[in-house]
Image (cartoon, rainbow, N blue to C red):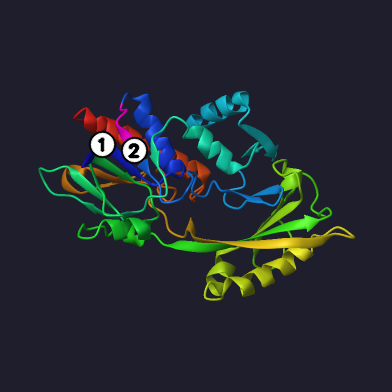
């Protein structure tokens, strides 16, 4: 049986930041277990023909000193850029949001394409993380960054009343390749005066990440929830009607794809950066729905995931020192 000091379930931003925090504190025997083929979670970028489209987080803002310090380093390294916004800048990755996630996770051990089926926690024994293929990895501590409904499924038999209060709205994103330009003005982002049910529209060529013209159309949680029972073809057809509004004269849509985010944004949040559970609180649950008490924004976002992951990593490091 493989043994690790800390196992982190989920390779999104919270998991990455928890791992980076542990490494910075000298805890090296760690492993991220990620069900997808890439780290990043909603820091997601899809290649479409010769182009690219961010179809999760499009940008992030900064309120905390911790993130501000990292952003200054990322700017210097050429990982991110200021996209738009004054006086509150919106930052984005220069090569697509998933590129930033990969850069942040570059030195972290990650087991990809691996789904966790259960966590077993027995007193006076190591934690056991069971994988879908039947493999078991034991650990002294476990950080769970999966969305609350998925975390609950892994923690069967453990009382998690507080975790069950978190609910999520879905989000549908239509991604379209265009023959010809869009009518979306520079810098390629719209979130005002949009049609009913539309949250934002983005031109990724004008954003600077795509060689060809690709457009993402994000539907609101309310619209997505209302339409989630329908098949992809019908949903994409409705979203394409929105994209067609932003075709420049002579342009046409050449291709269309749909992304369903089942857990896009928490409708309810927890005003703590993490929850501790299990025997001797060896399991820590964190993620973008876990906000620090002083969080002024009050909603899930890039920064809440970033800060929650750091706080979870710091707490595990404290526990390793017996605090």
Q: In which quadrant will I find the N terminus? A: top left
* Tag 1 near tag 2, CB within 8 Å: yes
Q: In what element is the residue under mark 2?
A: strand
Vertical order, 104 against 203 (above or below): above
- Taking the image as shown, residue 277 lies to the left or right of residue 200, namely left
x, y (%) of residue 87? 68, 37
Magenta part of the chain: 27-31
Tally of numbered discs: 2
Q: Residue at x 72, y 52 (%)?
A: 214
x, y (%) of residue 127? 20, 45
x, y (%) of residue 132? 31, 56
The residue nearer to you, when weighing 177 against 319, is 177
Q: Residues within 10 Å of mark 1 (few under 14, many from 20)?
A: some
- Taking the image as shown, residue 115 lies to the left or right of residue 142, namely right
Q: In what element is the residue under mark 1?
A: strand
Which SS does the magenta portion mostly show? Answer: loop
- Taking the image as shown, residue 240 lies to the left or right of residue 57, namely right
Location of mark 1 (residue): 4
């Amino acid at each position: 049986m493989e043994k690790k000091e800390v196992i982190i379930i989920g390779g999104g931003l919270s998991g990455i930041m928890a791992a980076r925090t542990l490494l910075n504190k000298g805890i090296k025997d760690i492993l991220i277990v990620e069900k997808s083929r890439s780290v990043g979670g909603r820091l997601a970028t899809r290649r479409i023909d010769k182009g690219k489209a961010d179809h999760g987080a499009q940008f992030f803002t900064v309120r905390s000193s911790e993130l501000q310090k990292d952003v200054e380093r990322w700017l210097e390294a050429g990982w991110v850029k200021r996209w738009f916004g004054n006086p509150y800048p919106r930052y984005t990755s220069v090569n697509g949001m998933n590129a930033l996630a990969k850069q942040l996770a570059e030195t972290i051990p990650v087991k990809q394409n691996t789904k966790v089926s259960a966590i077993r926690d027995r007193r006076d024994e190591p934690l056991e993380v069971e994988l879908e293929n039947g493999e078991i990895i034991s650990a002294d501590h476990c950080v769970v960054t999966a969305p609350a409904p998925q975390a609950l499924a892994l923690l069967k038999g453990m009382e998690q009343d507080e975790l069950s209060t978190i609910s999520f709205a879905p989000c549908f994103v239509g991604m379209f390749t265009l023959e010809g330009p869009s009518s979306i003005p520079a810098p390629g982002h719209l979130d005002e005066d949009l049609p009913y049910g539309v949250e934002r529209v983005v031109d990724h060529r004008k954003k600077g990440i795509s060689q060809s013209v690709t457009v993402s159309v994000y539907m609101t949680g309310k619209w997505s929830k209302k339409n989630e029972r329908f098949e992809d073809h019908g949903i994409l057809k409705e979203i394409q009607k929105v994209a067609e509004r932003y075709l420049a004269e002579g342009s046409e849509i050449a291709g269309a794809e749909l992304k369903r985010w089942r857990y896009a944004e928490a409708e309810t949040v927890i005003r703590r950066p993490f929850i501790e559970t299990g025997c001797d609180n060896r399991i820590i649950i964190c993620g973008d729905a876990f906000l620090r008490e002083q969080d002024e924004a009050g909603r899930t976002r890039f920064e809440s995931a970033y800060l929650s992951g750091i706080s979870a990593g710091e707490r595990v490091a404290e526990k390793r020192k017996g605090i």
